[in-house]
Amino acid sequence: MRGQLIKRYFLTGLLIWVPLAITAWVLSLIVSTMDQSLRLLPEAIHPHALLGFNVPGAGVILTLAIILLTGLVTANFIGQKLVIWWERLLARIPVVNSVYHSVKQVSDTLFSSSGQAFRKALLIQYPREGVWTIGFMTGQPGGDVINHLPGDYVSVYIPTTPNPTSGFFLMLPKKDVVELDMSVDEALKYIISMGVVAPPAKPRTVTRPHIQHLDT
């Protein structure tokens, strides 16, 4: 009996400290990485040189300031011309050109305010009929692919759990996917927690199961 109590208390303590420790580790990693931006400044104006001691997180402020300044500069006509010139320069470097443009296409798709990437959580049957999982709509098939797909299709990303940064890319008929009344954040939490942290149930607005057609 006493052993069971000790085990229960120990597991309760783990449930408190493990999330805190992982959160602290991730934040420390992010801050230490962003602090590397201080290397862009001359040694004479580093916080250590001015104050006599290091200031954790000073690089975070500098990094955010650089990102904001970059956005302000590239928002005008001259800045856009500089971006075009920079991309043309990178296009002449074989390996860098492939990596840069691939990453840029993905980032433009994900962060564009007008894009539909990761805007909708979907319920699909995968990897076989009768087995369901959650995916995210990333757009519609393009290129020569659409010439070989009869009917309306959507592009879907199926993340793995507990690491959603890896997964599978599928192209499915619209009629075979169900749009969930669930935010992307709720769906991600559901996936990362391996189904443990389920979003709150919402009342159904229909009287029978049906496949919802997605708006393009």
Image (cartoon, grey):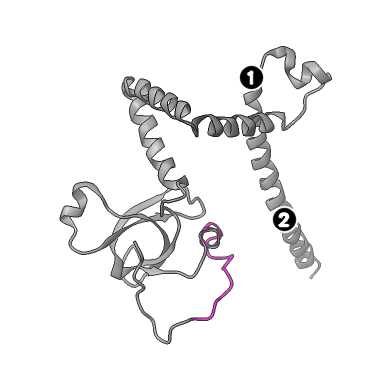
In the image, farthest residue toward the front: 77
Per the rendering, the mark at residue 147 is: none
Look at the image and tell me in which quarter the C terminus lies.
bottom left
Q: Which residues are magenta?
A: 187-204
Image coordinates for residue 36, horizontal then vertical, percent: 63, 25
Question: Residue placed at 46% from the left, 26% from the top?
Answer: 78
In the image, farthest residue toward the bottom: 207
Decide: is 114 above or below 88: below
Q: Nearer the viewer, mark 1 or mark 2?
A: 1
Image coordinates for residue 134, horizontal then vertical, percent: 43, 63
Look at the image and tell me in which quarter the N terminus lies.
bottom right
Query: Which secondary structure lies at badge 2?
Result: helix
Residue matched to label 1? 39
Of labels 1 and 2, earlier in sequence is 2
Q: Is residue 208 magenta?
A: no
Question: Residue placed at 18% from the left, 48% from the top?
Answer: 144
Hey, what amino acid is under mark 2?
A: Leu
Decide: is 89 above or below 188: above
2 and 86: which is toward the camera: 86
Q: Is 6 positioned to the left or the right of 169 in the image? A: right
Residue matched to label 2? 14
Q: Is residue 33 visible?
A: no
Query: Which secondary structure lies at badge 1?
Result: helix
Q: Is residue 188 magenta?
A: yes
Image coordinates for residue 187, horizontal then vertical, percent: 51, 62
Hey, what amino acid is under mark 1?
A: Arg
* Chief SS of the magenta region: loop
Q: Residues within 10 Å of mark 1 (few under 14, many from 20)?
A: few
Total label count? 2
Q: Is residue 167 visible?
A: yes
